[in-house]
Every structure is written in structure tokens, then in C-alpha cells.
Amino acid sequence: TVGSKNSANSASKTDGFYKNSLIFIPFPPEAIKVKNTLESAGLSNLTNDFVLSLNRAAEDASKKAFPIFSEAITSMTINDAMGILKGADDAATTYLKNKTSAKLKAEFKPIIKQSIDKVKVTSYWNPIATNYNRLTALTGGEQVNPNLEEYITDRAMEGLFKLIAKEEALIRKDPAARVTDILKKVFGSL
């Protein structure tokens, strides 16, 4: 639980995603032409505010992660625990990913939608998409309309699992990272 709690806490803080290069959520790749076009038209403030809003939505959703991780950990069987202990360096992360992804997605999507509304992501996205689509009407480019909720949800989950994998690697390799008696006992015996 230490790694998942640390990861969820880290991600859910203000700038937990935005200022962490490992999990930062960039402008949607399928709309990168939008970003480049707007920035070349002097509208980089719109794209910067938009990216900040994407990351804020992920930070808000991450507040729901630890209880879901905790439930998966407390329902772990002896066989699950042995598999993690004797498994690959990312066995605990893989276990959590397999056990929690569906529930995380179900919990994150409404929070991300609410967060998008709260931080007005659509107020940034709509002018971006409108300006871009207006420019493509003149230049003959393809118009875009990516699903922002899905994009942010997927990237938020990926980010959390990256943080958990990093914590797991640290716990497995560094005795000082084993901050609970059970971690010391279990990983000290390896």
C-alpha cells in the first residue's frame, strides 16, 4: 500500500501531473496540428491554458485512486502475494493494473468530466478547435474533435501506474524505501 498511496498522493497534488515530466499530460497527439497552427498564429496562451487544464483534471481524478488500490491490495490472496514477491520487478504494478483499471476508469471519467467543466477545459478547447477548424477551412486541412474525457482518463491512469512502478522498483531495490515492518520483513527475506 505504501507505493500506491505515495503515488496517488503525489499525483493528486496541485502540479502533481503538470510539473512531473514522467506523467505530464501533453496536448493530445492527434490534435498536435491544432497546437502548432494556433501557436504560429500567436495563440500559444490558449494552448498553454488548455494543457494546464488537462493536467488539473487528472490531478482531481487521482484523489479517488488510493481507496481503489487499497481495496485491491486488501483482497489479495496468498497466491497473488507470492506471485508479486517472486515475480518480475513490476509484478505489484501489474497486479494493481489488472485488478483496478476498470474501476479506476469508471471512477475517473465522471470526475474528469466534472473537472473539465470546473476548470473550463472546454472553454479552452472550444476556441482552440473553432480557431483551428476555421483555419483548416481556409487551408483545406482536416478538422479535429478528439474525445478529451477519454484522453485525460487514459493518461491519468497511465501516469499513476508509472508512479507506482517507480515506487515498486525503489522498494524492491532500496532497503531504506521499505518504510513499514511488513515491507522490511517481506523484501528483506529475498
Image (cartoon, helix red, strand yellow):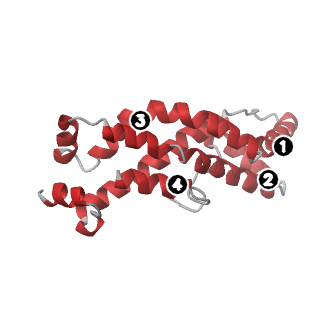
Q: SS class of the residue under badge 4?
A: helix
Residue 53, position as x, y percentages in the image: 70, 50
The alpha-carbon separation of the residues under discs 3 and 2 comes to 35 Å
| Residue in front for this viewpoint, 34 or 176 | 176
- Kind of residue at disc 2: Leu
| Residue in front for this viewpoint, 169 or 26 | 169
Which residue is denoted by mark 4 in the rendering? 11
Check contact, mark 3 vs mark 2: CB within 8 A.
no
Q: Decide: is 19 above or below 3.
A: below
- Give the left or right position of residue 47, taking residue 13 as reference: right
Check contact, mark 1 vs mark 2: CB within 8 A.
yes
The alpha-carbon separation of the residues under discs 1 and 4 comes to 28 Å
Which residue is denoted by mark 2 in the rendering? 46
Which residue is denoted by mark 3 in the rendering? 100
- Kind of residue at disc 3: Thr
Check contact, mark 1 vs mark 4: CB within 8 A.
no
Q: Which mark is in front, 3 or 2?
A: 3
Residue 100, position as x, y percentages in the image: 41, 35
